[in-house]
Image (cartoon, rainbow, N blue to C red):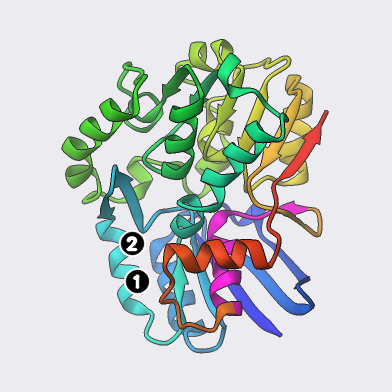
Amino acid sequence: MKRIVSISLGSSTRDHQVVTHFAGEEVSIKRIGTDGNVQVLRQHLQELDGKVDAFGLGGTDLYIYAGDKQYTFKESKKLLQIVKKTPIVDGSGLKNTLEEKVIYKLQDNKVINFQNLSVLLVCGVDRFGMARSLSKISKNIVFGDLLYGLSIPIPIHHLTVLNFAAKLILPIITQVPIRYLYPTGKAQEQMNPHYTKYFLDADVIAGDFHIIKRNLPPKLEGKIIITNTVTKEDEFLLRTLGIKLLITTTPLLEGRSFGTNVIEAVLVALANKGGAMKQNDYEWLIQKYGLKPRIQFF
C-alpha cells in the first residue's frame, strides 16, 4: 500500500484520511493541517521523511508561473530542503496538465460553453493551466490576481497583461511568507469579501477554493464554480448561496475532493520515479488512472 501525507499550512479542521484504490492499487491518503504554523509543518516533514511514499505540500505553493517562467517561494524552498528521502510536490504538475485539460473537456463535451459566459479566475499565476485554456476559449475573462492577491483594485482581462504584470511582481512577492498573500490556518475559516462585483458579474468562478470562499458574497444564484479542495461543509455553503454547478478538477475520493498537491503526490508515489516527473509523465498517468473531474449539479 502506498502512503501519502499532505502537510498543509491550512486549518486543521479540514483534516481528513481515506484509503482508496487507483487501478487496483491501495493508497492511504492523510491530510494534516498545521494552522499556519510553519515550524510544526517543518517538524512533520522531518519526522515522516523516508517513512511515507510521497508528500503533498498544501496551504502554500512551491512554484508559481508567469508565462513559461517559474518562480519559487523562498519560504517553501526552505521546506523543500528539509526533505531528503521522500518526494514532495505542491500540485503544480497537475495544475499545468490536468486542470488545463479539464477546461477543454468541459467545453468539448458541452458541459459548459465558456465562449458565451463571463469568467472570473481568482488567481491566474497559481492556476496557470486554467489561465491558458480559459483565455483561449472565453471571450470575457477577469484574472483576479491583483484584486484578491494584493488588494489592488485592478482587474486583468488578458493573459499577456497578466504575464507582464507577474514578471514584474513575482520576483518580489515570492520573497515574503505566504501568509501575507494567501489565507492560511484559521484565516481559511473566515469570510472577508472584497471586490464582490466581479463574483456577481461572472457566470463562472474558477480557481483556488480558499480565495473563492474568503470572498464569497451572500448570494450567487445560478453561478458555476470550478475548483477543488472541497469538503461536504463547503458543498453545503455553496448550495445555500444558490450555486448551480460545482466542478472539482480532482476526482471525488471517499466523499472528499482533495487538492492538486494530494493527487499529484499519489501519482508520484505510484510512478516510483522518486519525484523526477515531467509533463508527459503526468499526462500519461492522468490517462492511465482515468482522472476525471467531479461534476455536481445542485
Please tell me which residue is depicted at 66% across the width and 82% down the height of the picture. Answer: 2
Percent of width and height locating residue 287 = 64, 62
Secondary structure category for the residue under label 2: helix
Q: Give the Cα distance between marks 2 and 1.
A: 6 Å
> Badge 2 is on which residue?
76
Judge the density around disc 2: few (<14), some (14-19), many (≥20) Cα neighbours within 10 Å. Answer: many
Please tell me which residue is depicted at 81% across the width and 30% down the height of the picture. Answer: 297
Please tell me which residue is depicted at 50% across the width and 50% down the height of the picture. Answer: 185
Percent of width and height locating residue 85 = 42, 87
- In this view, the residue in front, 283 or 127, is 283
Evaluate if marks 2 and 1 touch, with contact meaning CB atoms under 8 Å apart. Answer: yes
Q: Please indicate whether residue 145 sits to the left or right of residue 273 in the image.
A: left
Q: Please indicate whether residue 178 sits to the left or right of residue 272 in the image.
A: left
Q: Please indicate whether residue 284 sits to the left or right of residue 96 in the image.
A: right
Please tell me which residue is depicted at 25% across the width and 36% down the height of the picture. Answer: 166
Percent of width and height locating residue 96 = 45, 51
Secondary structure category for the residue under label 1: helix
Count of numbered tags: 2
